[in-house]
Image: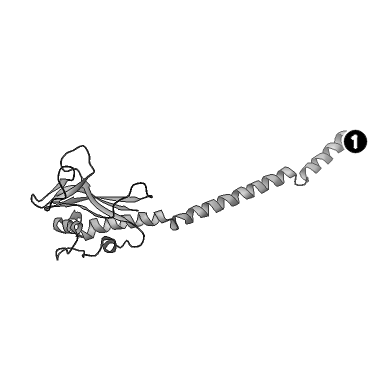
Amino acid sequence: MEKGSPSDGTNAASSRRSRRRAQTTIDFTVGVVLFVFVLVAIFAFVAGTIQPFTSGDQENIVAVNRVADGLSKDTLGDPDTPYILDTDCTVAFFEGGSPPADCRFTDQPLDEQVGVTGSAFLNVTIRGNVSGSASPNELLCWDETTGELVEQDDTDCTAGDVETLAVGDDAQSGVQSSMTARRAVSINGTSVSLVVKLW
């Protein structure tokens, strides 16, 4: 065959052209789309990692757990025996006023004692099931006469010798989001829950 014949020369020239072709519109579009996608993903990731440090709910989660741990491991008992609450100190905490001398708290308002000040509302209760009823989450009271825990539904907790084990602000339902922390504790040999609610 002669040099430059259509069967040989055309194929060689077209293969050289295909290896040296310029960027097409489709190549450019794919590159721009990938660049924008990666840029958006980076901004979304960075915003997601920074958000927990600026959100108010995260502060409340930390605060409510700190309060629950402080009360159950230290304030209402002895740090050497965490989660076992001193009965006299616990009742005095919920009664208010001057506590016995061996208690680990003062007669300051609740928010100052636990270190939650500002615009937060706080509620601390002792709940459980001491009568074998169907509900495991009854508000409990301390009966001074019998020296035992009783459920609010079974007893008049407003009587002079019975103290409701609840202190703090009244929880308003539906007002805004709230955070709750529970700790399994023991009072007078009875397993109950210490419930701290912050909103």
Displayed quadrant of residue 100: bottom left
Displayed quadrant of residue 80: bottom left
Residue closer to the observer: 170 or 12: 170
Does 142 appear above or below 112?
above
Residue 37, percent from left and from top: 60, 48
Q: How many labels does the image show?
A: 1
Q: Which residue lies furthest to the left in this view?
A: 145
Dot 1, crowdedness within 10 Å: few (<14), some or many (≥20)?
Answer: few
Q: Is residue 37 left or right of residue 131?
A: right
What amino acid is at disc 1?
Answer: Ser
Q: Is residue 72 visible?
A: yes
**Residue at (20% x, 52% y) in the render:** 165
Residue closer to the observer: 105 or 108: 108
Residue 34, percent from left and from top: 63, 47
Q: How is the image coloured?
A: one colour
Residue 129, percent from left and from top: 19, 43
Q: Is residue 91 left or right of residue 183?
A: left
Q: On the rendered image, what quadrant is the N terminus found in?
A: top right
Q: Can residue 81 be seen in this view?
A: no
Residue closer to the observer: 26 or 8: 26
Does 33 appear above or below 167?
above
**Residue at (21% x, 45% y) in the render:** 128
Residue closer to the observer: 4 or 32: 32
Q: Helix, strand or loop at disc 1?
A: loop
Q: Residue furthest right?
A: 2
**Residue at (8% x, 51% y) in the render:** 145
**Residue at (14% x, 57% y) in the render:** 88
Residue 199, percent from left and from top: 35, 53
Q: In this view, does 74 lie to the left or right of 47?
A: left
Q: Mark 1 points at which residue?
A: 5
